[in-house]
Image: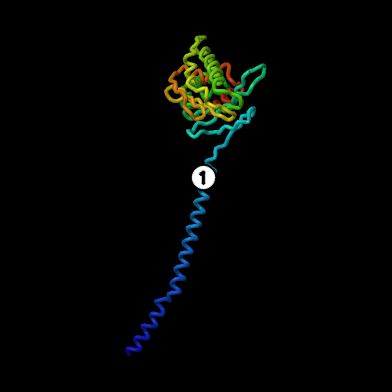
Amino acid sequence: MAAIAENIVNVDNQHTTPPLEEKLNGMQLKDETKVAAETLDQAKKQEEVAAAAAAEEVAVEVEPKTGVSFPVKLTDGKELMTVGLRKKSMLGMGIKIYGFGMYYDKEKLKENLKTKIDSKESTKLTKEMYQAVIDSDSAMTVRLVIVFSSLTMNMVKKNFDEGLGASIKKLTGGKKNDDLANKVMGAASDGIKLSSGSVIEISRLPGNVLQTKVVDEVISKVESELLCRAYVNMYLGDDPLDKEAKEKFGMQLLSMF
């Protein structure tokens, strides 16, 4: 009887306890399946990252007279309203100085202007519409991209001070304020190197602060409502730097309402 019982136990063991080789093969198969699953998971994650990166790529608009590309949206959310060209007459020739892109937070701009622009009547551009933007304390940025390779910082300061000074006079009935105009670029070192493609950004910050960055360096922050209005007036006033750019801005403004 004992022998029979032992044989039964041995038979049961043969069915319940697989050989070592089978165990190893089973473990190896599970490991290979796990590795394959992890590899597939990693591949999917890489695809998702690549897709996200592609989605984050921002479209650009090219200023046609200079070929300069401007992103249609800045990292802070401001959107491109218009692009244009700043020219300067030198030695009887019109020299291309820089291309520019003008950015606003469209939703905030619309909110600030809703009491001044009637959406039911805003079917054509008016001087009052542009003036409402000029007077509005709406955050904006103008990105200037240098295209004149021989431009020096001293030339930039002189040209900028003249243009801003003239804009201040228009808003004050002919009164000069050179000291205020000079505060914007006055602190910029003449040693700053500018070349074709160098970027200058001038932003109107909340609280009527005009901030100027030259090649990613903040060179001034001036709190002045008049200065902010005068700067925007250079682009949207009666004598803009680029008339076509002003008109395009106006069409974007109409589309918002």
Q: Residue 148 is drawn in which quadrant?
A: top right
Residue closest to the far front: 191
Q: Residue 23 is drawn in which quadrant?
A: bottom left
- Which element is circle 1 on? helix
Tell me where residue 138 appears, x and y as whole percent: 47, 25
Residue closest to the far bottom: 1
Residue bearing mark 1? 52
Say left or right for 198 vs 228. Answer: right
Residue name at image x 49 percent, y 51 percent: 45
Total labels drawn:
1
Residue closest to the far right: 92
Q: Quadrant of the N terminus?
A: bottom left
Tell me where residue 200 appears, x and y as whole percent: 53, 27
What's the amino acid at mark 1?
A: Ala
Residue name at image x 58 percent, y 35 percent: 60
Say left or right for 9 vs 209. Answer: left
Residue 127, can we see it? no
Foreground pick, 115 / 24: 24
Foreground pick, 91 / 61: 91
- Tell me which colouring the rendered structure shows: rainbow
Tell me where residue 89 appears, x and y as whole percent: 63, 18
Local crowd at mark 1 within 10 Å, few (<14), some, or many (≥20)?
few
Tell me where residue 8 appears, x and y as whole percent: 37, 84
Residue 4, can we see it? yes
Residue closest to the far left: 2
Foreground pick, 160 / 102: 160
Reply above or below: 156 against 10. Answer: above
